[in-house]
Image (spheres, rainbow, N blue to C red):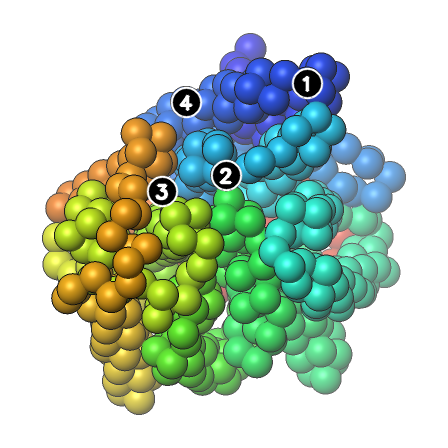
């Protein structure tokens, strides 16, 4: 019997959380190393999964009936749409833990709780990326909120309660809208076909009155738009990113935001492919506002963490434009840029956190001329910024180029807006770097700032290596996702191969025949993005 590797990757961190919770509270070092061990095992399994992944078809499928009376399956799989983010999730958790190893000045029960929350969040994130049944996805999607609520609310900055409250309220509103939409589709399928199912192929064939269908589509758009975030649903974002502990900022900006983008590509567009095409210009327009607005607001920020938050917001808009360009270039760039964004934003937040440790501030005016004082920090920060602004040879370049090509194919206006946003973002980040690192030391206290420690280098070097590796050899990663993305843009039935290769019988698909007499039919071609 083959190892159910996806289930192991999902539930091993949860097992780790339970293990950490029974350890003695006095052994903080033991707590950290135990959490790290579970994370590193998960990373090794995820690398193994990524290496074995073939590129075009859904692989590592696990499908068993879970709640048979409701047609809900425990249905997992890996394809071009999620393989990179499963790997990024497994990579960023140990890096976040290393980065906050000494910064997490916790003792006793607080340390135990923090480690358990990190491990629980990792389980929920991997589960959300791997789930192919819509109800299973929703369970993992909601489960992410619980550990992040406590990570921000208990271990965040001075305004953590305010930030947590906004984060939770926005998330719950989006989640409830999505749940209502899921249940409406679910029961309409039952009323028409006579069976319950959480299978996307079957649910996508359910027909609705035009007004109802638009409401259902936008329920998903709002839910995933809040999580991403998409303008104007982003107002929870700056405070949540800034008030989180540095490791929390890495996880919420690097990983949790991508679940929203992934929700669009995996569920919203396949469920409503006609409306996805019809309303793509609207979503792209909102994303374009995010690109330009985010870059402009980032430029005028006086505080580093808030600047990175708005820069991240701008680039999320860029990813969504690539996705809704509805062509292979744009979608391929969006999928690759999801991983790139996770790498780059994580490095930015880690470095800003290190600077905050050194000076107890992240105000740009409190630095100045520190490049000669901390050469290792300034060098790695420069590499990260160059990757962020899309310098050729680093990981941001190829994906941004694909997104820009995809945007131009879709619309000249959106192509110009994406390119302009990328330029504004580059100006913002390079100007910030010049003010912080160039020139003479402006404050006495800055002359004694310590450079990166071995632990901090250990957290940053893997991210820098990935920036260079993906930048110099993008073909390896594009070959992993390209064939699957091409099939996705031509045929929305991304699940069909998983259904065929699994041992679980597919639920009936609604056609005119099944609508009239409930007879089962073959899975039809669901069309594509033309």
Label 4 environment density (alpha carbons within 10 Å; few <14, some 14–19, many ≥20): some
- Which mark is first along the chain, 4 or 2? 4
- Which mark is first along the chain, 1 or 2? 1
User: How far apart are the two marked residues, 1 and 3, measured between alpha carbons?
Assistant: 49 Å
User: How far apart are the two marked residues, 4 and 1, measured between alpha carbons?
Assistant: 29 Å
Q: Residue at x 42, y 80 (%)?
A: 297
Q: In terms of secondary structure, where does tag 3 sit?
A: loop
Residue 378 rendering spot, x and y as whole percentages: 21, 52
User: How far apart are the two marked residues, 3 and 2, measured between alpha carbons?
Assistant: 42 Å
For marks 3 and 2, give the one nearer the viewer.
2
Q: Which residue is mark 3?
A: 56
Q: Residue at x 58, y 42 (%)?
A: 125
Label 3 environment density (alpha carbons within 10 Å; few <14, some 14–19, many ≥20): many
| 256 vs 384, nearest the viewer | 384
Q: Which mark is residue 44?
A: 4
Residue 198 rendering spot, x and y as whole percentages: 71, 48
For marks 4 and 1, give the one nearer the viewer.
1
User: How far apart are the two marked residues, 2 and 4, measured between alpha carbons?
Assistant: 26 Å
Q: Which residue is mark 1?
A: 26
**Quadrant position of the N terminus in the picture:** top right
Q: Which mark is residue 103?
A: 2
For the residues labelled 1 and 3, say whether their Cβ atoms are less than 8 Å apart.
no
Residue 401 placement: quadrant: bottom left
């Amino acid at each position: 019997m083959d190892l159910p590797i996806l289930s192991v990757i999902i539930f091993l961190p949860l097992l780790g959380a339970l293990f950490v919770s029974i350890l003695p509270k006095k052994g903080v070092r033991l707590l950290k190393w135990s959490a790290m061990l579970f994370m590193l095992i998960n990373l090794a399994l995820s690398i193994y999964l990524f290496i074995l992944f073939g590129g075009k078809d859904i692989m590592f499928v696990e499908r068993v009936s879970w709640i048979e009376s409701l047609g809900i399956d425990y249905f997992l799989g890996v394809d071009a749409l999620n393989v990179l983010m499963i790997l990024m999730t497994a990579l960023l958790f140990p890096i976040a833990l290393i980065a906050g190893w000494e910064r997490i000045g916790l003792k006793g029960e607080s340390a135990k709780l923090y480690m358990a929350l990190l491990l629980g969040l990792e389980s929920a994130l991997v589960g959300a990326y791997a789930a192919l049944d819509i109800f299973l996805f929703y369970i993992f999607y909601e489960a992410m909120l619980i550990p992040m609520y406590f990570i921000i609310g208990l271990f965040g900055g001075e305004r953590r309660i305010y930030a947590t409250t906004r984060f939770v309220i926005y998330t719950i509103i989006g989640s409830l809208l999505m749940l209502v939409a899921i249940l409406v589709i679910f029961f309409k399928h039952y009323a028409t076909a006579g069976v319950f199912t959480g299978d996307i192929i079957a649910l996508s064939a359910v027909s609705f009155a035009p007004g109802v269908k638009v409401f259902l589509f936008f329920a998903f758009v709002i839910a995933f738009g809040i999580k991403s975030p998409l303008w104007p649903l982003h107002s929870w974002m700056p405070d949540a990113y800034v008030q989180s502990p540095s490791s929390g900022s890495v996880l919420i900006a690097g990983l949790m935001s991508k679940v929203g983008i992934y929700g669009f590509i995996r569920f919203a567009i396949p469920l409503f492919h006609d409306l996805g095409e019809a309303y793509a210009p609207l979503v792209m327009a909102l994303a374009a506002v995010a690109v330009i607005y985010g870059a402009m607001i980032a430029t005028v920020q006086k505080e580093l963490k808030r600047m990175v938050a708005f820069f991240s917001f701008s680039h999320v808009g860029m990813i969504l434009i690539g996705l809704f360009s509805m062509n292979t270039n744009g979608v391929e760039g969006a999928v690759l840029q999801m991983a790139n964004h996770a790498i780059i934003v994580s490095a930015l937040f880690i470095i800003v956190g290190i600077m905050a440790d050194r000076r107890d501030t992240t105000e740009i005016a409190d630095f100045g001329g520190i490049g000669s004082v901390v050469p290792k920090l300034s060098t790695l920060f420069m590499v990260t910024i160059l990757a962020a602004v899309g310098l050729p040879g680093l990981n941001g370049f190829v994906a941004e180029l694909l997104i820009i090509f995809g945007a131009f194919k879709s619309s000249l206006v959106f192509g110009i807006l994406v390119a302009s946003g990328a330029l504004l973002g580059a100006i913002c980040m390079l100007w910030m770097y010049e003010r912080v690192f160039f020139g003479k030391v402006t404050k006495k206290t800055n002359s004694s700032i310590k450079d990166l420690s071995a632990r901090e280098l250990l957290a940053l070097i893997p991210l820098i290596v990935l920036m260079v590796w993906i930048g110099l050899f993008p073909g390896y990663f594009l070959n992993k996702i390209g064939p699957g993305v091409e099939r996705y843009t031509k045929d929305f039935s991304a699940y069909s191969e998983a259904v065929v290769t699994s041992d679980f019988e597919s639920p009936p698909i609604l056609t005119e025949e099944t609508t009239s007499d409930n007879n089962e039919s073959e899975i039809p071609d669901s069309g594509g993005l033309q």
